[in-house]
Image (cartoon, grey):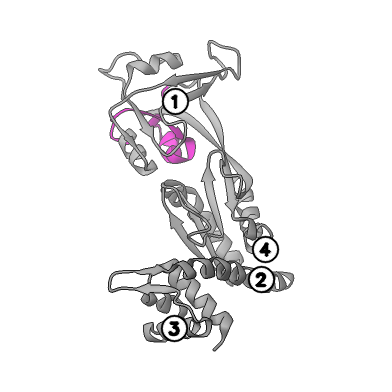
Amino acid sequence: MDRLQSMQTLVRVVELGSFSAAARELGSTQSAVSKQVAALEKALGAQLLARSTRALKLTEAGERYVEQARRLVAEIAEAESELRAGEHRLQGWLRVATSVSFGRLKLLPLVRSFLAAHPGVRIDLRVSDGFVDLIEQGIDVSVRIGEQPDSSLVARRIGTTRRLVVARRGYFEGRGDPPREPADLLAHNCLVYSELRSRDAWTLAAGPGASAAPGSLVTVQVGGNLQTNNGEVIREAVLSGMGLALGPTWLFEAELASGEVEPALPHWPGRDIPIQLVSPPQRRNSAKVRAFGDHLAAGLA
């Protein structure tokens, strides 16, 4: 039995949630993968997986073993990748997580160009607007919008998200005067993206032409009839004329350029928030993560 190969197989079975999914990825059969994991359990003298017809679940011993195995497999893969990097060839899987809208609109084009530059790399792109546990899900790197509260992770700022209060063109017809000051937002239906810690507390910065000193910050507790944890829903709600949103300019880039969407409070943009590349500590020195981060930073500039 090849112990390292068996560990790699076990890790992928756990991360993908089934023997069949791991077999497809590894180009093997479900029975071969199952036998490989069973042989590892026999060699260790411990049951690692509790099998049922519906799902796989790690035993207590399995949780401890997989945590160590995942770290070891990643370190070995990275050591090999570092050698190949010396020959200008990165290889292997890079598991990336990000939010749905950012993944579709901004990250995917950069992933495409990164893969073209590094044909030996394969990317597993996970998109979700909810919390993603990087270590538990075996993620190498996550692209996150906003401050990084988890000090146990390694964060690198690769860009800046600029935000505006936006509305569909013609939205204010029959709905009263457009807002001129942040406090005027209280009279309008404001759509809230709930995945940011600020939620309905919109912080705006005085820009050129504002009634306050440039850079002054004002926070308004807005209200409205819709909040959601999905940026795509916010985007569609604005485009359908449901209300105003404090959104990143990249989310409405095409519509702002065409005039379909307009700044509703042009002299008071939202406070800029960082775009960060976040990794588990054991991926700090990863050649693939470093190269991917450099590529994104250049692309987002």
Viewer can see residue 90: no
At label 4, the amino acid type is Ala
- For the N terminus, give its image quadrant: bottom right
Mark before the other along the chain sequence, 4 or 2:
2
In the rendered structure, the answer to whether residue 188 lies left or right of residue 279 reads left
Pointers 4 and 2 in contact (C-beta within 8 Å) = yes
Mark before the other along the chain sequence, 4 or 3:
3
Q: Which residue corresponds to the image point at 32% horizontal and 28% vertical from the top-left?
A: 243
Residue 178 or residue 288, whichever sits in front: 288
Q: Which residue corresponds to the image point at 46% horizontal and 79% vertical from the top-left?
A: 26
Residue 245 or residue 266, whichever sits in front: 245
Of the two numbered discs 3 and 1 in the rendering, the one whose residue sits closer to the viewer: 3
Q: Which residue has dot 4 on it?
A: 287
Q: How far from the left and from the top, in percent, is residue 119?
A: 58, 70
At label 1, the amino acid type is Ala
Note whether 235 is above or below 243 in the view shown: below
Of the two numbered discs 4 and 1 in the rendering, the one whose residue sits closer to the viewer: 1
Give the label on residue 38, or none: 3
Q: Which residue has dot 2 on it?
A: 81
Give the distance between the C-alpha atoms of the residues marked 4 and 3, in whole angstroms. 33 Å
Give the distance between the C-alpha atoms of the residues marked 4 and 1, in whole angstroms. 39 Å
Q: Residues within 10 Å of mark 1 (few under 14, many from 20)?
A: some
